[in-house]
Amino acid sequence: MTSHDNVLEEAALWLAEGRQVALATVIETWGSAPRPVGSQLAIRDDATFVGSVSGGCIEGDVVTRALETLDTGKTELLEYGVSDAMAWEVGLACGGRIRVMVEPVKG
Amino acid sequence: MDAALLNQLVRARAEKRPVALATRLMDGIQKLVYPSDKSEENWLIKAIHEVLSSDKGAVVSAPDGAEWFLNPFNPPLRLILVGAVHIAQPLAEIAALTGYDVTVVDPRTSFASADRFPGMTLVTDWPDEAMAALAPDARTAIVTLTHDPKLDDPALQAALGSPAFYVGALGSKKTHAARVARLTEAGFGESDIARIHGPVGLAIGAKSPAEIAISIMAEITETLRT
C-alpha cells in the first residue's frame, strides 16, 4: 500500500520518461484553507496531475497556469480567494485565501 | 525547479534525510538546505530548523529583505506495531496509506510472516531488542497488540523511555489495570504510565479488526494534530 504523498516521486518518474512537468505549491494561507502550506500538485504536459493544492476548487486553473510556465520557463505566484457571487470565477468556496507558486521543472 | 534538484530531493526523501527546499520568491532561485549544512548563512539554517521541527512550511524574510519560501521535507512518521496479530494487518495498511513507515515486531515467525504482511517491514527479534534497534523518536507512534505481557511489557517499557508521540496498548480496562500494576511494580511513575492510551483507540464502537484499526489510527492522528 502506498501513501498519497508521492507527488515529487511521481514528477521525477514523469521526467525520467521524457515528459515535461510543472509543480504547484501552496506557499501561504489565510483563514480557512483546504490544504496546508507545502501541499503540492505535479502536472504533466498532457494536463494529467497528482496531489492537491485545494479541495478541488482551484486545481483546474492551477493546472492551466502551471502548463503555461512550461512555455515561459518562469516561476509565477498566484493568489486565490473567496469566489462569492461570481460563481463561474475560480475561487475557494471555503472562504479562505491562498498563495500558490507554479514553476516548470527544467531538464 | 531544476530536474537535478528535484532528483536530489527525491533521493533525500528515499534516504529518509530531513531537508528543506528554499525558494527566493522574486526570481524563483532555489536550493536544498540540510539542517547540518555548515556553509549556509545563519539566518537560513535557523529558519530551516524551525520549519523542520514544526513540519510546516513558511515564507520568511532574509536580512536583505528578500522573501523566501521554505518547504520542509521530514522523513515519514513511523509506526511500530508490536504483535503481528489480526488487527495489525489492517492497521499496517491504513497507517501506510496515511503516510507512515510501518514496522511490525513479533518474534513469533508464524505471525510475522511476509504472507500475512506483504510489503511491510517485519522484525522477528524480541521486542526489547527490536525497540532498542528501532530507537523511537518524537515522530514515532508505538502500539502493542499481543495481549501477552511477555511481549507487550518490554515494548511498553522501551516506549515509555522514548520520546514517542503516541503509545497505545490493546486490551480491555481490566487488562490495562493489570498492566498499570505491573509497570508501577517495575518502577514507572503515574505520569509515565498516563502516556499509554489504553484501552487503545477512539471509542467508536469498533468491532472488526479493520474497524479497530480505524479507531486506533484516528486516535494516533488526533494525538499528532491536536
Image (tube, coloured by chain):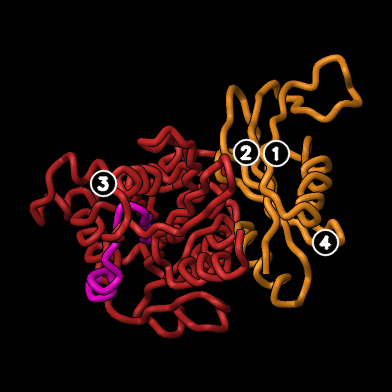
Q: Is residue B159 left or right of residue B5?
A: left
Q: Is residue B135 magenta?
A: yes
What is the spatial separation of the Cα atoms under label 2 and label 4, in whole angstroms? Answer: 24 Å
Write down which chain is painted red. B
Q: Residue A45 carries which label?
A: 4
SS category of the residue bearing label 3: helix
Q: Residue furthest right?
A: A88
Q: Is residue A44 left or right of residue B15?
A: right
User: Which residue in the structure is indicated by mark 1?
Assistant: A54
Q: Is residue A31 left or right of residue B183?
A: right
User: Which residue in the structure is indicated by mark 3?
Assistant: B177
Q: Do labels 2 and 4 share a chain?
A: yes
Give the residue at x 16% y 40%. B190
Write down which chain is painted orange. A
Asked if disc 4 and disc 1 are in contact, CB closer than 8 Å, the reply is no
Q: What stretch is highlighted in magenta?
A: B128-144
Mark 3, mark 2: which one is toward the viewer?
A: 2
Mark 4, mark 1: which one is toward the viewer?
A: 4
From the viewer's perspective, is residue A20 above or below residue B218? Answer: below
Asked if disc 1 and disc 2 are in contact, CB closer than 8 Å, the reply is yes
What amino acid is found at the position of numbered circle 1 in the picture?
A: Ser
* Residue A54 visible in the displayed image: yes
